[in-house]
Amino acid sequence: LLHHVVYEHEFHDTDRYFYRLQCNQQPDILNTFCIWTSQDTRIKHGLEVIGSLLHKLQEIFELIEDPDTRKINYARAQDHTELFFAFEYAICELQFVNIVRMDKKSLLAFGLNVYQLMVHFAFMKVGIPNNATDQAAFWNKLSFSVGGDCYPCSDWYYGVLRGNRKGPYGG
């Protein structure tokens, strides 16, 4: 739960050392609010995890969608503390999904849905990039831990949506 800022000490109740909460330890990895370990018995199949996460995301969307324009107001997601917290906690389950054992069709479906979840969650948690510079940093810096490995949003975009092809501008 608490980590020494430079990983040199275990937690001690003292004013000599500085610590940060787990949820702030790796802010660029968006689904590290909690760390799932192999001892966690709640781990489900990847597509089950995705289904549960999409359901939670839909619940949030129903609360933050403008009824007139049908646009999603991502900035309002964190106003719904209980739902957002449940979603932020649940999305950490992706850390322990074994994508190596998935067949090709399941992996494609999983990848497309992970990308969708990553984008929506990043918009809710970090905000929507305002310009091209912010957009490049957003896609290359923000990442998700899936199956024990970290993948930037750009890897999911180029790997899954573009079939491992680089963008027209070398992205």
Image (cartoon, rainbow, N blue to C red):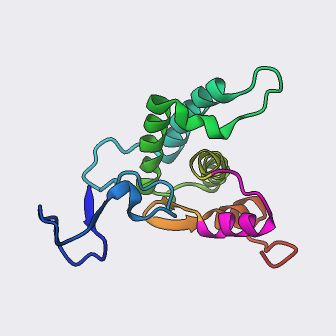
Q: Can residue 85 be seen from the camera position used here?
A: yes
Q: Which residues are magenta?
A: 127-141
Name the foreground residue: 132 vs 160: 132
Query: Main SS type for the magenta part?
Result: helix
Q: Which percent across, then down, holds residue 93?
A: 42, 48
Q: Residue at x 47, y 54 (%)?
A: 31
Residue 167 in which image quadrant:
bottom right
Left or right: residue 23 versus residue 114 is left
Q: Residue furthest front?
A: 15
Q: Quadrant of the C terminus?
A: bottom right
Q: Can residue 154 be seen from the camera position used here?
A: no
Q: Residue at x 66, y 53 (%)?
A: 108
Exactly how many numbered labels are in the figure? 0
Q: Which percent across, then down, holds residue 18?
A: 25, 68
Task: Tell whether position 129 is magenta.
Answer: yes
* 45 is higher (above) or lower (below) than 65: below
* 39 is higher (above) or lower (below) than 156: above
Q: Residue at x 79, y 62 (%)?
A: 131
